[in-house]
Amino acid sequence: RADRTKRSFLNMFRQISHLFEMGYTFGNYLRDYGCWCGVGGSGTPQDNIDRCCMVHDRCYDQNSRDGCSGIHLDDYSYEWTSLSISCTNSPGSCDYKNCNCDKEFLECLRSASFPRTFLPGLRNFNKYG
């Protein structure tokens, strides 16, 4: 049976902690990692994890350009299906689009073998040159 969940800005964090069984310690991994993870983002991604963050940022940026507001505080619905999520809002809605950004981010991290491939040297990387 799928677990139906509706949350606020913590959706993605809960999804990552659930999928990777890390509790909330994953924030220590992704905050200020490489050029794209955390606040801001620019430059060339330093590895596949950083590339996932770049794609996720750009997905949110596209949703903003499409008129979706409050992306980081969005309240969307999803269901767990095995090791992924299924977005349950109306297809095409901002909630659905934002949920899909987070879903693709989770899938990208999993394909990048996160957290096994995490490189401590990329924490606090000088993303601004």
Image (tube, rainbow, N blue to C red):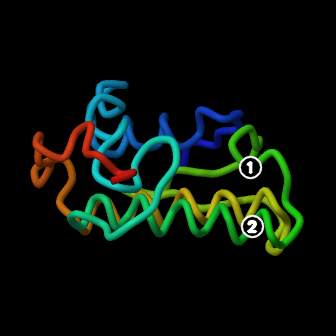
Can you say whether 17 is above or below 37 in the image?
above
Going by the picture, which residue comes out furthest to the right?
67
Disc number placed over residue 63 in the picture, else none: 2
Q: Nearer the viewer, residue 86 or 103?
A: 103
Q: Residue at x 54, y 56 (%)?
A: 102
Residue type indicated by callout 2: Asn
- Where is residue 65? Give x, y as percent: 80, 70
Can you say whether 24 is above or below 121 in the image?
above
Q: Residue at x 71, y 38 (%)?
A: 6
From the viewer's perspective, tell me whether residue 124 is left or right of residue 53.
left
Report, in whole angstroms, how far the alpha carbon at label 2 lies from the one at label 1: 8 Å
Can you say whether 101 is above or below 23 in the image?
below
From the viewer's perspective, tell me whether residue 7 is left or right of residue 32.
right
Q: Residue at x 74, y 63 (%)?
A: 96
Q: Are marks 2 and 1 in contact (CB under 8 Å)?
A: yes
Residue type indicated by callout 1: Ile
Q: Which residue is labeled 1 in the image?
A: 71
